[in-house]
Amino acid sequence: MELKLINARYLDTDTMSIKSGDIGIDKGKFVSVGSASDHEADRVIDIKNNLVIPGFNDAHTHSPMVFLRSYAEDLPLDRWLNEAVFPHEAKLTAEDNYILTQLAVCEYLSSGITSCFDMYYFPDAMAKAFKETGFRCVFCGALNNFSESLEKLEDYYIRFNSYDPLISYKLGFHAEYTTSRELMEGIAQLAHKYKAPVWCHNSETFSETKDCIGRYGMTPTELMDSIGLFEYGGGGYHCVYLSENDLDIFSRKGLTAVTNPASNAKLASGIADLVKISEKGINLAVGTDGAASNNALDMFREMYLACVLQKLKYNDASAMNAEYILRAAIVGGAKAMGLENCGNISEGMNADFAVIDMTRPNMQPENNIIKNIVFSGSKENVIMTAVGGRILYEKGEFFIGEDLDYLYRKTSEICERIFSE
Amino acid sequence: MELKLINARYLDTDTMSIKSGDIGIDKGKFVSVGSASDHEADRVIDIKNNLVIPGFNDAHTHSPMVFLRSYAEDLPLDRWLNEAVFPHEAKLTAEDNYILTQLAVCEYLSSGITSCFDMYYFPDAMAKAFKETGFRCVFCGALNNFSESLEKLEDYYIRFNSYDPLISYKLGFHAEYTTSRELMEGIAQLAHKYKAPVWCHNSETFSETKDCIGRYGMTPTELMDSIGLFEYGGGGYHCVYLSENDLDIFSRKGLTAVTNPASNAKLASGIADLVKISEKGINLAVGTDGAASNNALDMFREMYLACVLQKLKYNDASAMNAEYILRAAIVGGAKAMGLENCGNISEGMNADFAVIDMTRPNMQPENNIIKNIVFSGSKENVIMTAVGGRILYEKGEFFIGEDLDYLYRKTSEICERIFSE
């Protein structure tokens, strides 16, 4: 086999329990888990009783938006969008996105994230970046009234679902408030043609939801459901303002709610009701959103916020629990993204994993390892991240086939060009 | 000189701007800042254009509570306190606190924290731990109806204010709801005798504040002020439920409000109104609180939450700003703790500093370095922490005079003993 992890503890996400044993990896997959293996391996890594976890699946992001990190913060949402985001985004080129995507990949890896569900533009350039770095990406269509088209969406859908084992593509559009009913109906036809799930931003802000009700007499979820967008599943990003009926639609149609607590906090959008989502048995996934609105691509931050903001929302310290959220960040994301072979450390699954350093002070004592990860874990604890059995990050160094200094210099040039125009 | 940092950028907290130059350190203090220095140094460190910041001053904590990290989370506040915290705390020995304090020091250092304002028991054992590790601590008296006494408080005050240059002691008590009026009056007498500020937990929860009004017809702040506790300043920890009149008292008496956003979120206490505190010109400091209620001793988490929770509270993405919060975490804390010689990198100040690695993906691009630190910074960025010119943490290693494995083993033994009883 290619790789053997010895003296490991690992998280079993089926039982959400910590187990011990060796882990064998070959051809990108876990081939033996738990039992000591006598097979020779090209490389043997002593995990030294640290913790191997399945990689986090970041279920909503816009990778190239790293260029806007800290560019224009602490502004009201409308000024931030109209003055800081939209005019500058419009200047991005495919080559820019190729560079910026690689920078985002480094940040994901440093947080133990092994895949992302990415909605943005120039997917060819981005797919090249993901493939070259070795990172797993599920694209989501970004169609709206101002860019892309149904033809392009279908073309992307076909091409990127047979592009590379690391890449796949889901039908999707930006949001109800940026997409005409005709376009949504066209997407529904594609969904039926390909028996495919559909994704979009959904009920992120109060005004988005209110305006949709004003336009259509229905919430975004009700509208999309009525158009037939969810006949083959899918889900929504943010889901801050889902009504009871929306939640029932999510439940009935087997949709996933992706929560983005850091983005929703920073942009003052609100706090999604994860307690209700959990009670309704709706699949929950966790996403960072883009760096423009977060500002970090850090799953530890998201998990922590996903838990504690519920406690504030419900004025109840017992609201929400760490285990549920950790599972959402790993298994919920994999399920949302159609990554059936990701999300657990078991034989036959993709060897997407991170190693958590349990010897840092913030992980001690080990009263409860899962709570330690969610409530005190941080990027300092990630000492290795691997996708499909390839180690892309180890002890602070990146092995993505590109030099970091080069990426930083190019990113800086992109920012200089775009912000000075 | 002892130490010279070359090719450095550094944060000037007077102007909240980033400057460049060399930094010379001798006898625990900054002796030359900004200009290239020809002086020989025992050790020269190339900062490689990374960022030197004055260390964070953690203005409220209970260091030994690390033993309770992740012990009993996601419980309602009263059950958590009465079942998880109080009965187990009661079993701690001085020797336990000596070990646990050292573990906490490691965690502070890994987050760039160089001093803490600590309220707990067995200060002799804790002072020994702080002194031996080389960490700066300002103790706050923990007097209440159930432990300590006025005599002990005065004894501690005298002894620990001449114990070691790293250690000082402030008059204080646990909180109004655990301390009789007679005891508070006794503390007020000590405050007058020593012309000393007084500190305590203040208005942390809604019920604490309501009950105090029920008992005395006054808020905790009004009561304490009426007793004469604040004639020489001081302040309160948490300050979630300050009334307009309380804020005016804080302003008039020059008190400091210490905010503990992570603890207040996790225990569902609420969100302190930092916007009003800022508008009233009240000194704001930032604290982690103990690991039992946080669960991390991480100033990056606190700063991030201090900012974004205001945005949620006010439903306004422009509420609160990064610069104000970063300054509070450094200068506000130093001012609160009476550390007049901490909080800036300038000649004659104590050489308490941290080095922020700007070459990590989360710090790129550098559109705004201060916003990067507050909104995307994490412990992964701290590559060095020094107190009084002594480097106690460097590239993941701790130089505190004690072996980490030993501390972890002893901590685990303490937990085993206490939780199995």
Image (spheres, coloured by chain):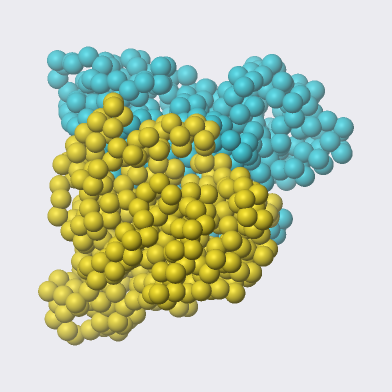
Chain colours: A yellow, B cyan
The quarter in which the N terminus of chain A is drawn is: bottom left
Res. A149 in view: yes
The vertical placement of B217 against B279, above or below, is below
The one of A21 and A393 positioned closer to us in this rendering: A393
**On the image, which quarter does residue B375 sit in?**
top left
Picture coordinates of residue B354 (x, y %)? 34, 33
Q: Look at 19% across and 37% down and name the residue there.
A: A409
Instruction: Specify whether A45 is left or right of B281.
Output: left
Q: Residue B281, how many percent across, how many down?
A: 60, 19
Lateral position of residue B172 relative to residue B212, left or right:
left
**Residue B42 point in image, percent of width and height:** 17, 27
Q: Is residue B406 left or right of residue B197?
A: left
Where the C terminus of chain A falls, by quadrant? top left
Name the spot of residue A411 as percent of width and height, x first. 24, 39
Q: Nearer the viewer, residue A27 or A84?
A: A84
Residue at the image point whose x is 30% and y is 82% from the top: A348
* Residue B289 shows in the view: no
Quadrant of res B388 = top left
- Camera-side residue of A400 and B162: A400
Identify the residue at horizontal 21%, vertical 33% (top origin): A413
